[in-house]
Amino acid sequence: MNHKVNSIATVAADDYARQIGKEAVPIAIKWKDLVAKSSSCKEVQNVLEALKSNEMQKCSRSYQVVENELSEIDGVLLREGEIDDTVYDKANINDAMAKLKCKEYADARRGARESEVEVGDEVLLREEDKGKLSCNFGNDRHVVTSKQGSDIVCENPSNGKVTRRNSTFVKVIPKTPSLNKNDSPVGDANTQQRPQRVRKQPDWYGDVVIHALDE
């Protein structure tokens, strides 16, 4: 019996809460309704007249304090408040500093460093792994045409194909120094060599003559 009474009370409470939830949903006021309500309010109309005639001393103290913030649009009294954005500025600064610290820590852990690829360098592009015997980079040479951060755009001189890659997907080809026609090859005359021991026959052989045995 008690269980049945408790279940009925629970259902009634749920219905009541559901009904309150339906009735408590806020509904936005339309502008025309707001204009109608404002025109029928005697206090609002008195404040608007005092605001236009610059006689706010006739109104109550609460309106006189915020006189500089009051305005009127279509007969509706509005108040323009000022938002204190100092809290938001501090929050943005703290958030930026925290993100910078996290980035510095991650870069240090991963050993990140700036890319050494420059515009005009010849590079090789990384290829998909086709097997354990395949090379990581292709054989076609590309010339870097532009660079923005880690984004690199290079062009294949043979066919004119333009490719965009991350800096981690390219490998710089070392530049070989060009020889001048007037340069002469450097000899090995001044090359320092390691000292060598003197090779000779041991002294204990004396005057013994060693003959080779013919087969």
Image (spheres, helix red, strand yellow):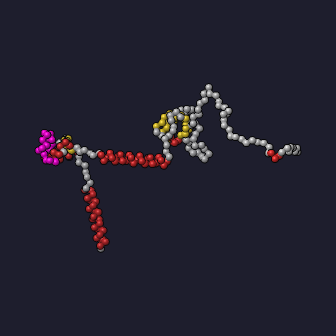
Residue 141 percent location from the top left of the image: 57, 35
Is residue 174 in the magenta section?
no
Residue range corresponding to the magenta coloring:
46-62
Q: Nearer the viewer, residue 20 or 201?
A: 201
Image-based side of 90 in relation to 183, left or right: left
Q: Chief secondary structure of the magenta span?
A: helix
The quarter holding residue 124 reads: top right
Residue 177, placed above or below residue 94: above
The correct choice, above or below, for 41 with respect to 160 in the image is below
Quadrant placement of the N terminus: bottom left
Indicate left or right for 15 with 180 as reference: left
Q: Residue at x 11, y 44 (%)?
A: 58
Above-or-below relation of 174 to 2: above
Q: Quadrant of residue 128?
A: top right
Q: Is residue 5 visible?
A: yes
**Is residue 35 visible to us here?**
no
Where is residue 171, by image quadrant? Answer: top right
Closer to the camera, 48 or 200? 200
Q: Position of residue 193 (x, y in %)?
A: 68, 38
Q: Position of residue 10 (x, y in %)?
A: 29, 66
- Nearer to the camera, 136 or 100: 100
Residue at the image point whose x is 41% and y is 46% from the top: 100
Q: Quadrant of the C terminus?
A: top right
Relative to the observer, which residue lies in front, 46 or 148? 148
Residue farthest to the bottom, as pictured: 1
Q: Residue at x 23, y 48 (%)?
A: 29
Q: Residue at (51%, 37%) from the top-left corner?
A: 117
